[in-house]
Amino acid sequence: MILAAQLLGSFGLFLVLLAGGMAVPFAIAVPGIFYLLLQGGLASLQAIGLVTWGSMNNFTLTAIPLFILMAELMQHSGLSFRIYRGLARVVSRLPGGLLQTNIVGCALFAAISGSSVATAASIGGVALPQLLQRRYNPRLSAGSLAAGGTLGILFPPSIALIIYGSFTETSVAKLFMAGVIPGLMLTALFMAYIGVRSIITRRGAEAEEPEPGGILLALADIVPFALLISGTMGSIYAGVATPTEAAAGGCFFSLLLCLFWGDLTWATFMAALHRTVQIVGNLMFIIYAAYIYAYAIGMAGVGESVTSWLVGLDLTHLQFFSALFVMYTVLGCLVESIGMIVITVPLLFPVLSKYGIDPIWFGIILVMFVELGQISPPIGINLFVIQSIWDGELGDVVLGTIPFHLLMFVLLALLVLFPDLALWLPRHMN
Amino acid sequence: MALLAGLAAEQGRVAPPDKAAENAPLGPIERVCRAACEIGMVAMGGVVLVEIVTRNLLGFSFQVSDEIGGYIIVGLTFLSLPVCQARRAYHHVMFLQARLPPRARAALNLLFDLLSLGFCAILVWELSVQVVETYQSGDIAPTQLATPLWIPQVVMPVGALALGVALLRDTWRSVRRLFTPT
């Protein structure tokens, strides 16, 4: 009972600091330190040095900066423009026109970037002005980009899955492969919705006129990226490379792509490096803060208490999933996405084996919840990314994402009913 | 064609969402830390690439990429701290602060700065103790390189200290904002 009160107190402090506007990593770390002090006084802080070294000296995490650098190189060299242009020549012939290009563009960029924000910003920056100029429905335009951006963490390489893998010691390569089929299904669901909606409403989203020779020109734009993606992900699937090696190889080949297909100069290269340091610094500090928090709750024995309490409830799989659904839906509205993973996973992961839940399947479910959080007001980060590009009303972006929200619920339900949608591909890996 | 021409016109508009913060000036400490991070990142890519080439094409491995990669990620984590603080790159949830009057907002920011400083002071102390203990006990990595572990560990207190300097600057700014008549 005391442990539960302490846990609720530290988690409450975290939420208060977060809602008050404290930087996310500090808002995680400060309650962790308070909790440590509460448990064992100043002496309990002595292990921080060892915890720091033990948790952060972690080769799994090395894939993160390399994948982020790869995406930043692409973005700073204007290659997201080429992806969008190439796809626009092919996909915009479908009902829904350029809105379809938004979704496929996001899916393709997601397979390079690993980050929802990078995906939404890269494709949104190119697409939104075009969509508005051509009088596409503004809500649907903004909504499709904010929701399409979330594909960034479902398709491999996914930063969220690397972080989940490093906290749970689950194979990142298998997690990557588990995201492929759900990612393709979500892309198909989004596209089907846009197509059906534009056929029914017949307003503002007609198919674009094809241009002569468009397919060849499109191939010239898309094929290099397709080769990069298949090389990076194929090497992981075939067991030839670890995720970090695939990231390093991908970085090298994206550098070549940016040199020969993009506008890479020394200045843009340095700008990409500067930006990567900031993104990586932000992520790594959140991860580090979460390790401190996890150590604090671990030292207090809260993990074991939560596990025994949850196991004692003897829930069915469906009840357990429903409880997760409620918890993550609420958390998604309050807690920043990576924060949501690192705060909850150390507590929930030990419960999974007791309930016979596959950790790889759970990783994908967790990422789906994070995706939902990224487009949930008031702190869904993709909403703000799109609004900052668009300069429109945040409310319109939120309303535009609602149908996509519902489609994500459909995929979640399918993943619960048919776990093999996520687990089939990892089972067939080398 | 109009679509493609329009797309071409928009090519230059692709920009990160926090462009203003990204252009904030960096002090000498942050610039050195950022340069170290960037060199580390490129070196990490290089080491892993060499490992791929030697293992797959030449049939042998230096078996150092895991170890060096781990050290570099620790360095990146800590040396990027002052850069991110100076550029306000950390995510903040602003929906509550945005509704507060300026003085209350300034007071809240000062409180957060002080709490962050307290956390940072604990880090500097504990991480320094860790490095000194590792040095005194002569710990080395159980690897081919047999790296004395205090060497990669020393970036941890250095980065935390640099964060402390950046935080002190922000705290001073918050104090001035709180006591400057609006």
Image (spheres, rainbow, N blue to C red):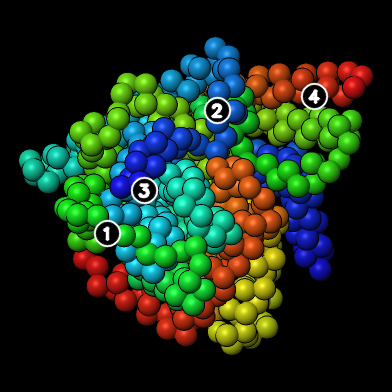
Q: Nearer the viewer, residue A230 or A50?
A: A230
Query: Is A175 drawn above or below residue A311 in the view shown?
Result: above
Dot 2 alpha-carbon crowd within 10 angstroms: few under 14, some 14 to 19, many 20 or more: some
**Pointer 3 residue:** B3
In what quadrant of the picture does the N terminus of chain A appear? bottom right
Place residue A260 in its image quadrant. top left
Q: Is label 3 or label 4 in front?
A: 3
Q: Is label 1 or label 2 in front?
A: 1
Distance between the Cα atoms at labels 1 and 2?
40 Å
| Residue A210, label in figure | 1
> Do the residues bearing badges 3 and 4 touch, measured as CB atoms within 8 Å?
no
Q: Nearer the viewer, residue A165 or A41?
A: A165
Circle 4 chain: B
Is label 2 in a helix, a strand or a loop?
helix
Query: Is B117 drawn above or below residue A11 in the view shown?
Result: above
| Residue A126, label in figure | none
Task: Please name the amino acid that badge 2 sits on.
Answer: Glu
Task: Please name the amino acid that badge 4 sits on.
Answer: Ser
Q: Earlier in the sequence, mark 3 or mark 4?
A: 3
- Extreme right residue here? B181
Q: Residue at x 47, y 52 (%)?
A: A134
Distance between the Cα atoms at labels 1 and 4?
57 Å
Is label 3 in a helix, a strand or a loop?
helix
Query: Is A243 drawn above or below residue B149 in the view shown?
Result: below
**Pointer 2 residue:** B22
Distance between the Cα atoms at labels 3 and 1?
11 Å
Circle 3 chain: B
Q: Residue at x 37, y 26 (%)?
A: A268
- In the picture, measured across the screen, residue A241 lies left or right of residue B78, that is left
